[in-house]
Each structure stands twice: as C-alpha cells, then as structure tokens.
C-alpha cells in the first residue's frame, strides 16, 4: 500500500472460545452512503481475517492532511454491516441469543469510552442498541447482516476498537445411550485428575429408546475450541473409598455443531445444556 495512506482506525473482533482469541468468521461491508464517503475523501477500507482498518490519504488534493481533519466531530458517521459466516456461532457464544438476522439489528458503536464497541468488557445482547430501520435499506440484500457497526468521526475517536465475545458456559450432560453402557454396574462420570464428580445417575427419555442413564456436571463448564477433555466414565464406583473401574478413559467434549435436547420445548435446556450421547 502507498505509504501516504495512514491508519485512521482499526476494529478488531475477539472471542475467548478460540485458542488464539481471534474471531475470523465476520465479513464486513460498508453501507452505501459510507462507501460513497470513502471514495469522496480518498479513504481506503481494508478487511483482514479478524479485523478491518480504514486508511486515509495524508496527501489530499496536493496538500498534507492530518487525522484531525477527518475526525472533526461534524456529525459524520461511518456505517458498516457485519455478516457472520458461522452457523453455529450462538451455540458457543454467550450473550447473543437476541441476535436474529433479518430482524432488528444489534448496533456496535464507538460511543463508549472504553475502547470497546459495546458496553462492558464483553458483548451482551441486553446492553446493545437495536435498529430495525436498517433492514429497510437492505431489503433486497442476498444475505441479511448479523449486526451493524457505526463509527462516529469525533475528535476523541481512538485508533483501535474491539468487539469482544465470550465463550458460553453450559451444563454438560452425558447420556449413556449405547446398550452395553446401560448394563454398567454403579456407573459414574468423574474427573481424570482431582475430585470432580458429575451428579447422577439420573433417568431420562430419549427418542426411540426407553429411559436411559445420564450424568450432569455440577457446575457449568466453559466451552473451548480445544477442550481439556478431563472427564472419564467409570463403573463400580465407590465414593467412600474412591475405587472404580475405568470404562472410557477420556470422554468427548460437546460438539458445537450438534443440537440435541431431550425436550425441544425446554428453551432453558437449549441454551444452558450441552448433551453428549455415548
């Protein structure tokens, strides 16, 4: 890029679910008025895997131009639309259950003084503004945007802003559906190291089968791109002596692409439980 172009502002997307903290599922495009403003003012929009940067030409109409000449606080607002290419995003992300593409859009903006494009240190659907008028402008768009992002070009605009998402924490429920697992004597799900024990056994109904045994984590467990896989299935478990026989040394973590609820009408379970069928 021509070295006359200097960064005006950068917006970064982060997510604690990912091992490197980078969220790479967003694609951003400027609104029609913003695209025209960029061309008119010789400003470039460049998109990267986990961020976008806006650059301005420091040599404009034959003279030197400063960042302050663009960030004047004259009411200019740059509007961008975020598309989310991950169909399973809501299944591992906290605070986005109210995000519904095709309806009122959540709005990220730099009206906060914290360096984040939202209130607080992480995205919360309840703390965001929503705008239903934007969709009228995008009625013919092939793909409805996931969110709207607005940058107010004020004198105190920072050079870096962040959208920070956090991983969802859920109760993990291991369901012993396989026939041979239903024959285990005094089964349990326990930590491979330490003293953690899942609650259970409990009896549940699953489609196509009679009641089967399940175990539920005592507390919510944070979902992660690379889970620690620290639980094991045992039988002949004796809590008093700590003795047991290992059946499965390492149990799988939840599959975020799989929605499996024992009762589809139970919305609390949908949002708060991760089921692993064994």
Image (cartoon, helix red, strand yellow):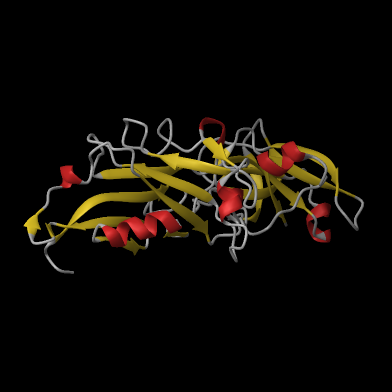
Q: Report x, y in % for residue 86.
A: 55, 60
Left-right relation of 209 to 143: right
For the C terminus, the quadrant is bottom right
Q: Report x, y in % for residue 70.
A: 22, 46
Residue 16 showing in the rendered view: no
> In which quarter of the view is residue 208 placed?
bottom right
Give the residue at the far left of this rendering.
63
Image vertical order of residue 50 relative to residue 242, above or below: below
> In which quarter of the view is residue 265 placed?
top right
Give the residue at the far bottom of this rendering.
1
For the N terminus, the quadrant is bottom left
Viewer-proximal residue, 100 or 21? 100
Residue 171 showing in the rendered view: yes
Count of numbered tags: 0
Image vertical order of residue 274 relative to residue 142, above or below: above
Image point 38% across, 59% down: which residue?
35
Image point 41% across, 55% down: which residue?
33
Q: Report x, y in % for residue 189.
A: 66, 44
Q: Report x, y in % for residue 184.
A: 79, 51
Viewer-proximal residue, 88 or 153? 153
Left-right relation of 176 to 271: right
> In which quarter of the view is residue 240 placed?
top right
Viewer-proximal residue, 243 or 186? 186
Left-right relation of 65 to 256: left
Left-right relation of 67 to 190: left
């Amino acid at each position: 890029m021509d070295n006359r172009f200097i960064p005006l502002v950068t917006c970064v997307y982060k997510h604690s679910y990912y091992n490197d903290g980078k969220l790479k599922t967003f694609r951003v495009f400027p609104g029609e008025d913003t695209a025209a403003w960029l061309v008119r003012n010789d400003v470039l929009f460049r998109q990267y895997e986990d961020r976008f940067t806006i650059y301005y030409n420091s040599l404009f109409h034959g003279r030197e131009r400063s960042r302050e000449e663009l960030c004047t606080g004259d009411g200019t607002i740059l509007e961008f639309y975020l598309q989310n290419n991950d169909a399973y995003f809501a299944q591992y992300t906290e605070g986005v259950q109210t995000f519904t593409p095709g309806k009122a859009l959540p709005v990220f903006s730099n009206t906060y003084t914290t360096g984040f494009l939202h209130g607080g240190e992480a995205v919360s659907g309840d703390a965001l503004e929503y705008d239903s008028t934007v969709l009228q402008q995008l009625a013919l768009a092939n793909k409805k945007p996931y969110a709207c992002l607005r940058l107010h070009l004020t004198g105190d605009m920072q050079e870096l802003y962040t959208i920070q998402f956090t991983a969802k924490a859920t109760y993990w429920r291991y369901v012993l559906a396989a026939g041979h697992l239903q024959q285990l004597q005094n089964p349990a799900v326990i930590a491979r190291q330490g003293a953690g024990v899942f609650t259970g056994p409990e009896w549940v109904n699953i489609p196509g089968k009679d009641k089967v045994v399940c175990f539920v984590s005592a507390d919510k467990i944070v979902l992660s791109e690379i889970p620690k896989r620290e639980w094991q299935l045992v039988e002949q478990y004796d809590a008093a002596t700590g003795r047991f026989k290992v059946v499965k040394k390492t149990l799988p973590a939840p599959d975020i692409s799989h929605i499996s609820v024992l009762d589809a009408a139970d919305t609390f379970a949908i949002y708060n439980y991760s089921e692993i069928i064994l």
